[in-house]
Amino acid sequence: MLSLKIAWRFLQKSRVQSAFIIAGIAVGIAVQIFVGSLITSLQDSLVQQTIGSTSQVTITALSEGDSFKVDERVLAVVRNDARVKSGAVAPTLSVNGLYSNGNESTPLTLKGGDLKSLDALSSISGRLTAGTARLNRGDILVGKDFADKYALSPGTKIQLTFPGNKERTLTISGVFDLGSSQVNARQAFVSAEVPRALLGWRSDEYAALETQLVAPFDSAAVATDWRARLKDLRIVEWQEQNKDLLTALQSQGSSSYMIQAFVLIAVALGIASTLAISAVQKTRQIGILKAMGMNDAAAGRIFLWQATILGVGGTLSGLALGFFLLFGFSFAGASFSITPKPGFVAFSAGIGIVVALLSSIIPIRKTSALDPIEVIQGG
Amino acid sequence: MADVLLEATGLDKVYGEGDTSTHALRGVSFTLNEGEFASIVGQSGSGKSTLLNLLGLLDTPTAGTVVYHGQDVGKLGKPALAKLRNSLVGFVFQFHHLLPEFSVLENVLMPALIGGRPPMESRKLAEETLGLLGLTGLEDKGADQLSGGQKQRVAIARALMNRPALLLADEPTGNLDTVNTEQVYKLFRQVGAETGTAFLIVTHDRAVAQQTDRILEVRDGELVQDVRNSYLPPAQ
């Protein structure tokens, strides 16, 4: 413990230098935590926005636009898979319609299904901005952007035109906001009977069986399994449909790792140079201690302790600063919130300390190699 | 008759190689008994400090042996040498070489802490040693807050802390005035008598050497004279 005591005194004697290096480590670790958490949360948010309210693995007929029977055989495969989010299985039918107010027209995709199943997928009931969540035969739930564009509100009847010049009048029961203006402008929900009647399909026939997973990135593996078991059907998963998004996320992740790596290298160089300078500054003292009988290992430990004190002090300050930055970010008005993951924070803290310890290698070697006679003869 | 503490045999020290080499010591041999109060004199560059460094286990001879209490130290590894340096030898240098980061008491305690002595026992011994050197009351002062004479006395206290069998001093009063120089030698004698420590003091000043009981003279790296000296303390 003598080495620790001496290390502490050396740091105390050079207070300003110690404070600077602790601040340097703190800034590095804070940036690491902030940037890492920011990028991860942004990615989570983008993924959530893209697929959080839609199907992640979808079963359809082999030919596009055809119907298929959602029977026990199909449901068993889906429901018995533990990777599927509980209750997030919705048989749906879709039909494209056109709304016009006389001056302008907008195409709408009407997704038909059972409100409870649709809710499990898209949480429509929880995202209503007006009206009530109800899907009786004559009801329609429309998106906020669509409603705003045409100044529509719950209770208003709208007339839609479908292929074959078929027309239906539906009553807006509610207005939803699913977080995407494109979805809010083009998507509407109706009961399954509306598209079924328009398409002329039987009651057990659907266009798709939509599902959500506990872990969205399992979709490729899930799809592969289901393809093997449902050879007569087509299985589509979100990752192959969103390759651009995934590439963007990966690029973003890579650039974030690069930033973090360079910050850590800068921190490591900072600590290493400070400790090296400290080793030079304390050459006389180390020489005297060695002349008094301190062995090379104990002399080296002085700098290991210095690195530990600086590393732990800097990392703890960095954690505090990092959380302060994250707290500050919550007032920045961003569309997503940053949630630091405990594992990542612990990893960053660990890196801070390990980098500090590695930085002590050069001064430890220098100290071990120091011959006390150099100091004694030098006066 | 006191026991032999140190036996130096045929000590040679060469610095560098080939044409640029310097022969600092040539075949120096002598023995030193426990409790002896001796000095090494010689001109600047004569090799006396080199000899002191070899005897203090800070340097290794090119040829020859240094034997302490019958043990050849040339056969010891670096850690064992460091341990022996801590327990057997005390150093006082021309420059006090105190650690400015520590108080007077901590500086004096340092050799005991390096040697792993129990803290309570060490503290008691440190206070006793400081008392011996008339430094009581300065324990908590910073090492860099003392006068030149005080610093050198703290350095002596530190060298004596582990009650070494031998105290090696290299021009210990080189930076002190006459009054302080006399005080230091008086202290050396007093401490030697009380602790049984042997003293080997390097000096270029013959008048200073006259205050010791034995004078070894080094000239051009060779031990040219080894005489007993009858020291009479000045009349009070």
Image (cartoon, rainbow, N blue to C red):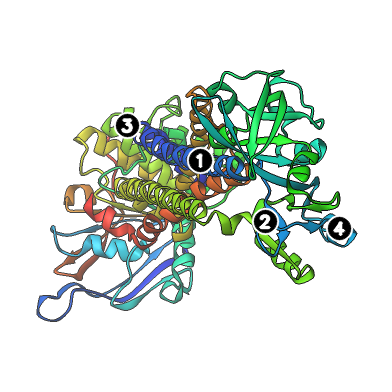
**Residue B112, percent from left and from top:** 51, 47
Q: How far is the residue under mark 3 from the one under mark 2?
A: 91 Å
| Residue A8 to residue B45: above or below | above
Q: Secondary structure at mark 4?
A: loop
| Chain ID at mark 4 | A
Residue under the point 45% across and 27% down = B140
Residue that lies at the very extreme toward the front in this rendered image: A165
Residue that lies at the very extreme toward the bottom in this rendered image: B18
Q: Secondary structure at mark 3?
A: helix
Give yes or no for contact between labels 3 and 2 (Cβ–Cβ under 8 Å).
no
Q: Which residue is mark 4?
A: A80
| Chain ID at mark 2 | A
Q: Which mark is residue A65?
A: 2
Q: Which residue is mark 1?
A: A33
Residue under the point 55% across and 22% down = A150
Report the side of B174 relative to A255 (left or right).
Answer: left
Q: Nearer the viewer, mark 1 or mark 3?
A: 1
Give yes or no for contact between labels 4 and 2 (Cβ–Cβ under 8 Å).
no
Q: Secondary structure at mark 1?
A: helix
Q: Secondary structure at mark 2?
A: loop
Q: Nearer the viewer, mark 3 or mark 2?
A: 2
Q: Which mark is residue B144?
A: 3
